[in-house]
Image (cartoon, rainbow, N blue to C red):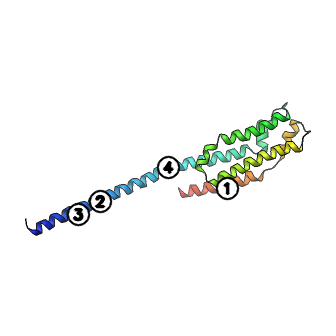
Amino acid sequence: MTPINWILIGLIVVMTIIGFFFLFNNKNDNQSGTGKKRHSDVVTPLKIQAYERLVLYLERIRYTVLVKRVFMPGMSRTDLQFALIQNVQDELEHNLAQRLYVSEPTWFNIIIVRDEVLKSINAAFDENANTDAAMMAQIIASMDNSLIDKAVIAIKKEFNTVCYES
């Protein structure tokens, strides 16, 4: 074989290796892009569902809604207080997994709202020690918690960010 033949064979081998290298890299790039797409296709709906559930939680612990759901005529003060507190806690426990899909500041807002609701309920009962359950239900239902509205707005902002990223 002549030196030119060796050079041609060498060039063919090098070109083949380079071709396989580029082919392999393109295949990996396409697969990783597909993986990101699949990840987004799965996670985005879960995030949206988390936002929906957390807004629902906040709406369910509004004082008017909470009292309407929990209060029953003939309840004692103690039973009413316990039922209100237990309901707020149970509702959050049903939504704990949503923490995976929302930012830490959003989750922190949820916890702050929960704590404020519990503190306000207990304070209302302490301040109205001689009031019966029916009147306590009215007092609590008439209370306002602007933190709920602020938390809902924060969730909506985060939701819009996620929706426009996808």
Give the camera-side residue of 106 and 66: 106
- Crowding near the residue tagged with mark 1, few <14, some 14–19, many ≥20 C-alpha atoms within 10 Å: some
* CA distance for labels 2 and 4: 30 Å
Q: CA distance from mark 2 to mark 3?
A: 10 Å
Q: Earlier in the sequence, mark 1 or mark 2?
A: 2
Residue 3 in picture, x, y percent from top left: 10, 69
Q: How many marks?
A: 4
Q: Residue type at mark 2?
A: Phe
Q: CA distance from mark 1 to mark 3?
A: 56 Å
| Location of mark 4 (residue) | 41
Which is more N-terminal, label 3 or label 1?
3
- Do the numbered discs 1 and 4 sit on residues whose CB atoms are within 8 Å? no
Classify mark 3: residues with Cα within 10 Å, few (<14), some (14-19) or many (20+). few
Q: What type is the residue that disc 1 sits on?
A: Ala
Q: Label 3, on which residue?
A: 15
Q: CA distance from mark 1 to mark 4?
A: 24 Å
Identify the residue position indicated by label 2 in the image.
Answer: 21
Most extreme residue toward the bottom is 4
Image height of 30 relative to 80, above or below? below
Q: Are marks 3 and 4 in contact (CB under 8 Å)?
A: no
Dot 4 alpha-carbon crowd within 10 angstroms: few under 14, some 14 to 19, many 20 or more:
few
Residue at image location 89% in from the left, 42% down from the top:
128
Helix, strand, or loop for circle 3?
Answer: helix
Foreground tag (1 vs 2): 2
Q: CA distance from mark 3 to mark 4?
A: 39 Å
